[in-house]
Structure formats: C-alpha cells, structure tokens
Amino acid sequence: MAEISIEKKSVENADFVFLDSGTGGLPYMLHLKEKRPDAFCVYVADTRNFPYGQKSAAEITASAQAAVKLVLRYFNPAALVIGCNTISVTALEQLRASFPSLHFVGTVPAIKQAAAVTKNKRIGLLATQRTVDEPYTADLARQFAPDCTLIKRADPALIYFIEHDFFTASETDKKAAVKPAVDFFSAQGADTIILGCTHFLHLSDVIEKAAGKDVRVVDSKEGVVNQALRLVPEPSAACDSLCKTEHRYEDCTFFVTGPDDIDESPYKILAEKLNIPYGGILRETEKAL
C-alpha cells in the first residue's frame, strides 16, 4: 500500500490545492492548468469520508474541517479550491470562519449560467442529495432563476459509478449509467441540465450525447477557475522545477486520504490516464499545525 511521508512528498506553499470527496474536482484542476501552466497544484480526494452527499450538514462540516487541516499540514496552499458542490453549499461559510487566513474558492451549481441559456425556462439540476436539499441551492434559484422551474434529481448511484467504476467502464456502461438521469430530465421537459456535482464532469460528453443537441449541459468549471486565478494571480517559485514538461502535469500529484484498506487501483488507473502522478495516502500525524 502506498504511503506518503511529509518529508518525502510534502510541498510547502503550493499555489492551489483542490479538495473533493473523490475524483470530481480533477477536471477543475486540469482546466486551471490549461489556463495557467505555471501554477503549482495538488489534488486531495477525501476518500476516507466519501460520499459527502449522503451525510448530515454537521457531518459534512466536520469532515471538511478535518480535511482542510490535513491539507494545511502537508501543503500550506495560497488558495484552496473546494471542488465539491456539497461541501460548498453546506460548509463553506464555516470553513472560512475556521480558517480566516486561507483563500477559499467554492463550487456551487451553475444556476445563473443555466438561466441565461435556457429557452423554455425548465432547468434540470443533477446533484447529490445534500446539494438538492440545501436551502443555499434554493436561494441560488430564487436569486438567479426566479422565472425558471428547477427540476432537481439526486443521483448517488451515478456518483458511486463514477468514483469506483467509470475509469474502467466501457462506453456502453457509461451510456447505461447516465440514462436514468437523462430520461428523467427529458420526461420533465428540461432543455438545460446543470452538472451540480463535480463528479459528473467526467461524464459530461456522455450526458451531452445522450441528452441530444437541443439540451444544454452546463457546469461551474470556468467560473471557479477564473475566481481562483483572480485570488492567486502569480505563481510561487515552487513550480519552477516541476512545471517544465509540456502536456504533462508533473506537479499535480493526486492524493487520497484513506481509509487504510482503500482499493487504490482505480485512482492509480485514473492518474495514469490523466498523465499525472499518483501520490498515495495522506495520513494524519501528530505534527501540530
């Protein structure tokens, strides 16, 4: 089992750390690297606490606070991108209060964007149960899409498929996995689908094809990355020796948090496919922050 020690793999003063419950935030990190190749990035999947979407608000907040402490202990980033809608709509305010010196960038459902592109004012939101139920999500709809009908669907089965099976799945398996959600929104007459959980971005092209040319599929990736780059406009010196190889992401090490018996093979496969290093398991230590 892979294990990473602080001495061997920690990186002080990373530009950005991307935190999610699993693999969902990876497209956000890679999109930032496309826009700013000189940025030093690290990815942390809080697999020990996956899935966040089925937890209570108190459990989500406690898990996210513990994960942020772990990130600070290892990487001390200039900004922490919460690549998870569930954490963002549930716990971001508490995280900012608990860690006031850290720049946070949240990820929330792209309701404003969907309202701008819908033609029939019927918008589908595909998300976790917690994101669907959170008052914050309803507030976003009232603020940015008051004249639209928001059709909500929680899909934990699809999230589980993406986290555990997607990276070795056939195209037939992927199409079958998204079909229930696409059919649900089609039956409700939605002409726009919001990918309200970052995991779904891994299947965005499959969802777009299944939904058809008359349905728009939107996400928050561009807005989140732009906000992160506004907060950290200049890269640290740490990337000088690590960001040299074109079309590789040698600084974007991908870590998980456990548990001890976690099957790391899907994450290793994913890292290899994305051409980024797999770093192993980040473990709690007695080292004080």
Image (tube, helix red, strand yellow):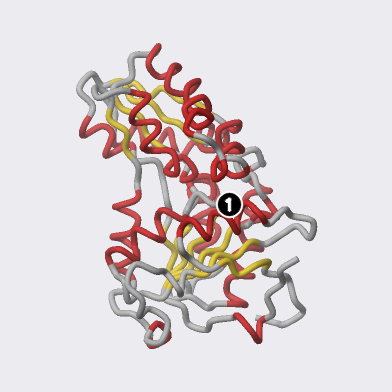
Q: Is residue 245 above or below residue 168?
A: below
Residue type (three-letter) at the residue carrying disc 1: Gly
Q: Which residue is mark 1?
A: 22
Q: Is residue 24 above or below residue 158?
A: below
Q: Residue furthest right?
A: 261
Q: Residue at x 72, y 82 (%)?
A: 287
Give how far across and how far down residue 222 sits, in percent: 29, 52
Q: Which residue is at 64% across, 84% downward?
A: 8
Residue at position x 50%, y 32% in the image: 174
Helix, strand or loop at mark 1:
loop
State the residue in front, 176 or 218. 176
Q: Position of residue 199 (x, y in %)?
A: 49, 44
- Foreground of the two, 101 or 70: 70
Judging depth in this view, the residue of 172 and 23 nearest the camera is 172
The quadrant the N terminus occupies is bottom right
Residue 58: horizontal and vertical position, in percent?
66, 48
Is 112 displayed left or right of 188 in the figure?
left
Q: Is residue 215 above or below residue 270?
A: above
